[in-house]
Image: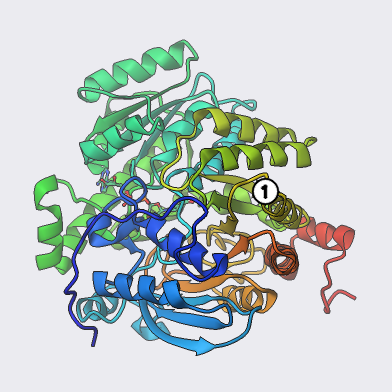
Amino acid sequence: MTSTSSSGPREVRAARGTTLTARSWQTEAPLRMLMNNLDPEVAERPDDLVVYGGTGKAARDWNSFDAMVRTLTTLADDETMLVQSGRPVGVFRTHEWAPRVLIANSNLVGDWATWPEFRRLEHLGLTMYGQMTAGSWIYIGTQGIVQGTYETFAAVADRRFNGTLAGTLTLTAGCGGMGGAQPLAVTLNGGVCLIVDVDPQRLHRRVEHRYLDEVANDLDDAIARVLAAKAERRALSVGVVGNAATVFPELHRRGVEIDIVTDQTSAHDPLSYLPEDVDLADWHDYADKKPEEFTDRARASMAKHVEAMVAFMDDGAEVFDYGNSIRDEARQGGFDRAFAFPGFVPAYIRPLFCEGKGPFRWAALSGDPKDIAVTDEAILKLFKDDDRLQRWMRGARERIAFQGLPARICWLGYGERDKAGALFNDLVASGKVSAPIVIGRDHLDCGSVASPYRETESMLDGSDAIADWPLLNGLLATSSGATWVSLHHGGGVGIGRSMHAGQVSVADGTELAAQKLNRVLTNDPGMGVIRHVDAGYPEAIDVAEQRGVRIPMRP
Ligand code: NAD
């Protein structure tokens, strides 16, 4: 059993600048990124080691955090540290091409993969919830999701509203680490957004970080503000404090004309969704003491919440599940039409996955925003004919506030990510940026996840729950030269519902890094292409044929 923590919470911030605190940049990078995940500017609840997504943690406890820092500081470039659910459990001699860190988070054997069993083991100190990029040390704050959210709302605009959200009103809830990207994504698409959160602090934090424009005094005030902006076709986002299970039905009852409805509360974990009639102040104590009763009440509230979403859909609104498993929770709460609306991946994102496109991201280990400005320019030049990317990169430069180490996200596909990687490595080698750049991605990617309520919902061949793909993805990243690789269970949608893999690679300007980056950043999106070819998607088959992806069953 894990020893109890003797060291406690403290403020953590990654080192900046070009002086190494570890033995090389290959180990300095995971060290800085682990610490960056817990930076108070980045993490939602750093004292509890919680980064985002309900209870997604970077380390199991503070003793484990200290042991990882100690180990990374002395780890050699032919050694590998093993991390089991946020706790370092061994160091082995490997070789230079091997990852410096291998991570497995939250994995449980099939029949045991339930929240109650997970929580029992968590209370014993034997596991932790790693979410996607929390336990794999490549969270970059709310920016990490904002482009995907922007792309999703752009696809909604294309499909239903002649390419713009101007003059439309979007209703959503959950203004946390990821959900906080929604208001900005809607306004970047020209629309009006009303976002509901039970916690006023979450709303004010997004105003501070410029993701949300304003917070209304109450629901009447919020409705007046958003309807005025909608009538004037003026982009605006307004937050309102309230419980979505109460506010959504109330808005429907009042007949407010809402065009698009979604939700990003932490519904995947019923203990992270506040039931109606429970005070914010009592939330965590109540959830800890009576998890089963709390779960039943949360699910009953989610049933009301989703019932209102379906009512908006019946009235003609565009409604989708935004990757938090709220439909399944509402179904368990007794609402039998919970799956009446689709998830966002089959609805809008899958065509991108067929091209190996996904959330490519990078961070400047120097901590210097000038380094990201240099990479922004380089990406704009490299992909000068891609209008959507140009629009996104220019908007991001102006509107996105950095959290922690300066970073950028930009969705790139097969044949693009490797070019960006080579370019960044050259920028480091030539001294145009002051220190190495880490390149990673979300686990929500084209070929790295099995998640039947999200990324692999409604696959063409019915292969939604096949979890061989993320395992192969993690093994391939390990074989290709990634700097750290992670295999997780339960991220995004909760325990029992997903398996996924991640990789992060370091562009340190060396020839060895150039070779590794070329392989990792070709093979990783290549998994997305072959996964969708295997499921029979014609778009993926075209990409594979045009770009020469080798697939033995299609000689
Ligand atoms: P978070 O825990 O940081 O934020 C959740 C927010 O929901 C909090 O601000 C909380 O106060 C609020 N909330 C809880 N119960 C509520 C209720 N009844 N009414 C109104 N507000 C309530 O989580 P996050 O990182 O923002 O992630 C949110 C969800 O989105 C998670 O389920 C996560 O797994 C999922 N997610 C989706 C994507 C995607 O691409 N779609 C990506 C990452 C995460």
| Residue density around tag 1, few if under 14, some if 14–19, many if 20 or more, within 10 Å | few
Residue 468 visible, this angle: yes
In-image side of 180 versus 532 (left or right): left
> Which quadrant holds the C terminus?
bottom right
Q: Secondary structure at mark 1?
A: loop
Q: Measured along the vertical axis of the image, is residue 134 above or below residue 311?
A: below
Q: Inspect this view and state whether residue 337 appears.
A: no
Judging depth in this view, the residue of 178 and 340 nearest the camera is: 178
Q: Residue furthest top?
A: 232
User: Which quadrant would residue 417 be assigned to in this image?
Assistant: bottom right
State whether residue 398 is above or below residue 291: above
Compare residues 393 and 404 and report the one nearer the observer.
404
- Above or below, 553 relative to 531: below
Residue behind label 1 places its C-beta within 8 angstroms of ligand 1? no
User: In this view of the protein, which residue sits in the foreground, 251 or 113?
Assistant: 113
Q: Is residue 484 left or right of residue 49?
A: right
Q: How many marks?
A: 1
Q: x%, y% of residue 335?
A: 31, 55
What residue sits right under mark 1 in the picture?
Answer: 431
Which x, y percent locates residue 11? 26, 54
Quadrant of the frame with the N terminus: bottom left
Residue 78 place in picture, x, y as percent = 58, 82
* Colour mapping: rainbow
Comparing 287 with 412, the one in front is: 412
Dividing the picture into quarters, in which one does residue 207 lie?
A: top left
- Is residue 519 left or right of 243 when viewed as pictured? right
User: Which amino acid, by three-letter code, is at mark 1?
Assistant: Gly
Q: Residue at x 34, y 35 (%)?
A: 206
Residue 64: name its quadrant.
bottom left
Residue 17: percent from left, percent from top: 49, 50
What is the residue that sits farthest to the front in this orientation? 19
